[in-house]
Structures are given as structure tokens and as C-alpha cells.
Image (cartoon, helix red, strand yellow):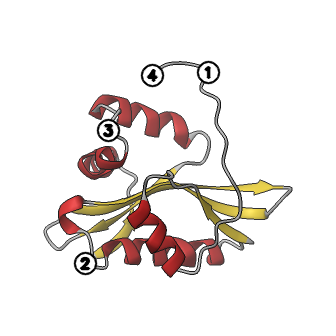
Amino acid sequence: MTVQFMSTPEEVASCYPVMVQLRPHLSREGFLAAVIRQREQGYRLAGAVDAGGKVAAVAGFRFFDALAWGRILYVDDLVTDEARRSQGLGQALFDFLVALARQEGCDEFHLDSGVQRFDAHRFYLRNRMRISSHHFALPLATR
């Protein structure tokens, strides 16, 4: 298994079967269009790819600066294929992102996680992340 940036159209498309497990509202075409749009805002993908070339875990992330935290790597999406969980793939991807954040001079590493994702919360707490705030949202449009 290797962790790598997923940049080419083919690599991005190969992330969809795993990403849709976290973002089931996205069609394949919607996912590809969103990635292209979000790239203009610095969005990138990284994937844990097995020896057969299949994506087993994927993360979408970006760098930005904030008055509250300084320079951060923010993880928009982090998901391991349901059939491949508890094999260390998510951990490898998480470690890759933390190392990248350090390499890029980030002050902090952030992500939000849905309140219903208890298994993910255990994973983040085990990795010494702390619950630092509440995230509030006001829906303005329907999907």
C-alpha cells in the first residue's frame, strides 16, 4: 500500500467509489465537477492505494491561514472503504497528512466530523486530536 496525491483525471475518478461512502449525495459526475471547482480553492486529494492499484482510503484537504489558528491543513473528507477498515489504511493516510502539514509549516491540523460518526471520533481521539469547538451550520439551499 502506498499513499499518494491523486491529481490526474483518472486518479481522481478512481477515488469516487470510496468517497461516495462518505458523501452519498454525490454522483460520479458531481464528484468530478466538485473536485475541479474546489481545486481553484486549493483542494487536493490523497489516496491510500493497494498493490493492485485500487484506492482503499481517500482524503480531500486544503491549506489555509486563519487568524484563530495560523496556517492549517484542513481535512474536508477522510474515508476508508467499508470493506477495508481496521487494516491501518486510514491511519497511514492520517499520518501522511499530518507529516505533510508539518512539512508545509502548518501550526495546526483540523477537521470536522459529523456528530453521528462515533467510530471516526474514536479514531481521531486515539490520534491525540482534541474536540476544540462546535461547528454550526445554516442550510441556505437544497441539494
Is 138 on the left or on the right of 44, as rendered? right
Residue 23 percent across, percent down from the top left: 37, 42
Visible residue check, residue 54: no
Which mark is drawn over residue 87? 2
Query: How far across and down, in percent of the image, does residue 123 sit?
Result: 44, 73
- Residue ID for mark 3: 24
Q: Rounded to the nearest whole Å, what is the CA distance between mark 2 and mark 3? A: 23 Å
How packed mark 2 is, by other alpha carbons closer than 10 Å (few <14, some 14-19, many 20 or more), is few
The residue lying at 56 percent from left, 75 percent from top is 98
Instruction: Left or right? Give the position of 138 relative to 100.
Output: right
Q: Quadrant of residue 122?
A: bottom left
Q: Amino acid at mark 1?
A: Leu
Q: Residues within 10 Å of mark 1 (few under 14, many from 20)?
A: few
**Mark 3 or mark 2, which is nearer the start of the sequence?**
3
Name the amino acid type tagged 2. Gln
Decide: marks 4, 1 in contact (CB < 8 A)?
Answer: no
Q: Which residue is mark 1?
A: 140
